[in-house]
């Protein structure tokens, strides 16, 4: 039986000319292809991970407080992109920084009574990368998303974490 499949379109079966719809085949890159893409190898297949925004973290506040969106929960454990600003800290922790939607500065004298927004990402920086400085401006980060309460070395409890694998400084608008 001869057949011709057109991915992302309709499949036309030449035997009997039956027309039926076929779901597009997912494009999945291997870890090697993703590493080549991050390293800038033009021969690799460049696959962009989904981008999530801070506004996608929480549902509207209800009688039970903040709750995570289905979109955020569905991306747990996957590679994502996110844009944000590095939080200025008086005493930053090595190998970790905080990312928020707006520039924020923390003062050590206030302890845990700080001005961090609920939608804050705790970013872990692997040893092969350098953590960006708070003055770098808007960044586009890529890495693996992890969701769930965890106590951090500084005593805070994180809810959303990102293990960084690449970052790009975005040009600020004039």
Image (cartoon, rainbow, N blue to C red):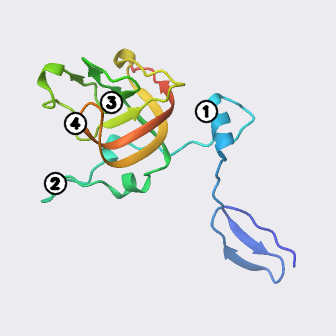
Report the residue marked by disc 1.
Answer: 38
Farthest bottom residue in view: 16
| Left or right, 19 with reference to 102 | right
Label number found at residue 98: 3
Q: Earlier in the sequence, mark 1 or mark 3?
A: 1
Report the residue marked by disc 4.
Answer: 117
Q: Earlier in the sequence, mark 3 or mark 2?
A: 2
Tell me if residue 7 comes above or below residue 39 in the rendering: below
Q: CA distance from mark 3 to mark 4?
A: 11 Å
Report the residue marked by disc 2.
Answer: 65
Between circles 3 and 4, the one closer to the viewer is 3
Image point 66% across, 70% down: which residue?
22
Image point 66% across, 28% down: which residue?
40
Q: Earlier in the sequence, mark 3 or mark 4?
A: 3
Q: Earlier in the sequence, mark 1 or mark 4?
A: 1
Q: CA distance from mark 1 to mark 4?
A: 30 Å
| Mark 3 and mark 4 residues within 8 Å of each other at the beta carbon | no
Q: Residues within 10 Å of mark 2 (few under 14, many from 20)?
A: few
């Amino acid at each position: 039986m001869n057949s011709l499949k057109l991915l992302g379109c309709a499949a036309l079966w030449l035997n009997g000319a039956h027309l039926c719809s076929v779901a597009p085949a997912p494009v999945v890159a291997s870890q090697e292809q993703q590493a080549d893409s991050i390293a800038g190898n033009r021969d690799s297949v460049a696959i962009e991970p989904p981008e999530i925004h801070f506004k996608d973290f929480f549902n509207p506040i209800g009688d039970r407080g903040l709750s995570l969106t289905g979109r955020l929960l569905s991306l747990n454990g996957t590679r994502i992109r996110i844009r944000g600003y590095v939080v200025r800290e008086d005493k930053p922790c090595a190998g970790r920084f905080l990312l928020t939607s707006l520039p924020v500065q923390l003062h050590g004298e206030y302890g845990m009574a700080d001005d961090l927004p609920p939608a804050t990402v705790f970013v872990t920086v692997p040893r092969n990368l350098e953590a960006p400085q708070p003055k770098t401006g808007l960044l586009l980060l890529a890495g693996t998303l992890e969701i769930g309460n965890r106590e951090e070395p500084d005593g805070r409890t994180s809810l959303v974490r990102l293990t960084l694998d690449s970052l790009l400084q975005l040009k600020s608008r004039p």
